[in-house]
Image (cartoon, rainbow, N blue to C red):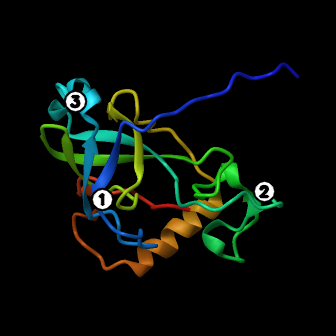
């Protein structure tokens, strides 16, 4: 196998307001403040024209990889064991995460967002606009076990008439 070049990632900012520890559930409606480093302030120009953005962040609090790279999604024994790459588990070969969030506003280098499932202090690696034309895949399918998991989570949440229409709502949440 050919030697691979070393990769170097540098944070461009941090989550400066948000949960001190992410809740298992209920982060969809939470607001957070992402502060971009001064060196990257100019790169934010025009971002406020988008209703939603992707926040790419470092899973700096995730655990180390287990020997068995298969898990029961959501730690539920009634669901089949699948590889960690088939889940949204925070334990990953490269601890990267990305979340589509509602962009509530921008003040200088700070972005106020809703729906970010990262903790206060989490390093932010990138911000990208959410493009409804390129990021939405209407014909996407998921395995039956995920539909079962989503149904269970939906049953646990209080019903709200416009839940599916809430900005920043992450349908299904993490696995």
Image side of residue 106 versus residue 21, left or right = left
CA distance for labels 2 and 1: 33 Å
The secondary structure type at the circle numbered 2 is: loop
Residue 60 in picture, x, y percent from top left: 52, 54
CA distance for labels 3 and 2: 39 Å
Position above or below: 73 against 3: below
The secondary structure type at the circle numbered 1 is: helix
The quarter of the displayed image where residue 68 is located: bottom right
Residue hosting label 1: 164
Q: Mark 1 or mark 3, which has the lower sequence index? A: 3
Position above or below: 81 against 125: below
Residue hosting label 3: 41
Q: Which of 171 and 38 is in front in this view?
A: 38
The quarter of the displayed image where residue 4 is located: top right
Mark 2 crowd level (few <14, some 14–19, many ≥20, 10 Å Cα): some
Q: Which of 150 and 28 is in front in this view?
A: 28
Question: Marks 3 and 1: in contact by CB < 8 Å?
Answer: no
Q: Residue at x 57, y 30 (%)?
A: 8
Q: Mark 3 or mark 2, which has the lower sequence index? A: 3
Image side of residue 143 versus residue 171, left or right = right
Residue 35 in picture, x, y percent from top left: 25, 45
Residue hosting label 2: 69
Q: Mark 2 or mark 1, which has the lower sequence index? A: 2
Q: Give the label, 3 or 2, closer to the camera.
A: 3
The secondary structure type at the circle numbered 3 is: helix
Residue 172 in picture, x, y percent from top left: 45, 61
Q: In which quarter of the image is the N terminus?
A: top right
Q: Residue at x 26, y 24 (%)?
A: 43
User: What label sits on residue 153 in the rendered view?
Assistant: none
Question: Marks 2 and 3: in contact by CB < 8 Å?
Answer: no
Q: Give the label, 1 or 3, closer to the camera.
A: 3
């Amino acid at each position: 196998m050919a030697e691979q070049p070393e990769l170097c990632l540098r944070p461009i900012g941090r989550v400066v307001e948000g949960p001190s520890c992410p809740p298992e559930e209920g982060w969809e409606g939470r607001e957070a403040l992402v502060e971009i480093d001064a060196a990257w302030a100019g790169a934010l120009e025009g971002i406020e024209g988008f209703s939603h953005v992707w926040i790419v962040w470092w899973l700096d609090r995730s655990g180390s990889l287990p020997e068995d790279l298969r898990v029961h999604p959501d730690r539920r024994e009634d669901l089949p064991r699948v590889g960690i790459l088939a889940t949204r588990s925070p334990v990953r070969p490269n601890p990267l995460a990305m979340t589509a969030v509602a962009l509530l506003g921008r003040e200088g280098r700070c972005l106020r967002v809703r729906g970010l499932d990262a903790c206060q202090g989490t390093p932010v690696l990138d911000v990208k606009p959410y493009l409804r034309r390129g990021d939405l895949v209407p014909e996407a399918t998921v395995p039956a076990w995920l539909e079962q998991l989503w149904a269970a989570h939906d049953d646990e949440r209080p019903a709200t008439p416009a839940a599916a229409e809430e900005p920043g709502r992450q349908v299904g949440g993490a696995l």
